[in-house]
Image (spheres, grey):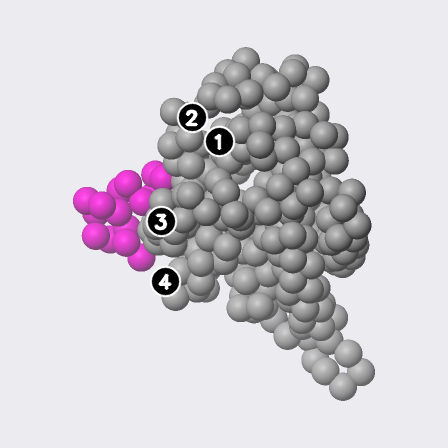
Amino acid sequence: MSWFESFVLGLVQGLTEFLPISSSAHLRLTAAFAGWHDPGAAFTAITQIGTEAAVLIYFRKDIARIISAWSRSLTNSSMRGDHDAQMGWLVIIGSIPIGVLGITLKDQIEGPFRDLRLIATTLIVMGIVLGIADRLAARDETGGKHRAIKERKSLKELGVRDGLIFGFCQAMALIPGVSRSGATISGGLLMGYTREAAARYSFLLAIPAVLASGAYELKDAGEGHVSWGPTIFATIIAFAVGYAVIAWFMRFITTKSFMPFVIYRIILGILLFVLVGAGVLSPHAGESGG
């Protein structure tokens, strides 16, 4: 991998990680469209550490408060009813599905799941799901001529059942094209949470999963055509760009619809099917490079 490729892929990772359009799919597609080798699951997982570092900094006050309350609740029973202490446990519980499935499906994640036809399918299907969830949220928030505004749930109403559902939604993102934020935010909206609550828990829930995945894949970094230098460089680029994107996205979701992302996903998925069907792209473009 050249330094230019690592710069572009780091930029793509930072731009797409927090948007509901799938960063892993865009890394895969960028390489395929440019005629580069597939960067691989290890490169993707490690560069995601950069964007998660952006989450750690952006939500540093929330994270510090949650860790402090959770730690004290281990020895102080009076703290166990505290919302932040409960959030600590809910993040742990919500991380179980992706941890178990990530290890179980490791071979599929690195192989069959990277087929461009599957990515096209997940882009379209999850785009439709996000559109439905967004429409239901908008209906509750604005009401209508014969419908009153319906109050949506905040994170204070999050329990074990919903935490696990969020976790299974996140686990779906093991398939490129699903999108970690897209799946968890869609799940949250369908369960009746506000856009801000669904996005905030989505980002907090991603922290242990992404950091663990990146650490696990460190042993495979530097193998094949991807060396350590470009991987670290791409991770730094992803961090810088990712921080700017997450700050913008958290402001965007308070007043805007997800429909632009829905339309983009569907158009990109259809285009991908057309290109593969016409023979312009191979479903396994770039994979032979390692």
* Whole-number angstrom distance, CA of label 2 to CA of label 4: 35 Å
Residue shown at 68% from the left, 68% from the top: 132
Q: Earlier in the sequence, mark 2 or mark 4?
A: 4
Q: Earlier in the sequence, mark 2 or mark 3?
A: 3
Please say if the residues under marks 1 and 2 sit with CB atoms less than 8 Å apart.
Answer: yes
Q: Secondary structure at mark 4?
A: helix
Q: Secondary structure at mark 2?
A: helix
Which residue is tagged 2? 220
Residue 180 coordinates in the image, percent (x, y): 55, 49
The boundaries of the magenta stretch are 67-81
The mark closer to the camera, 4 or 3, is 3
Which residue is tagged 4? 160
* 268 left or right of 64 in image: right
Query: Which quadrant of the view contains residue 280?
Result: top right
* 85 left or right of 255 in image: left
Which residue is tagged 3? 104
Residue shown at 72% from the left, 30% from the top: 35
Please say if the residues under marks 2 and 4 sit with CB atoms less than 8 Å apart.
Answer: no
* 79 left or right of 17 in image: left
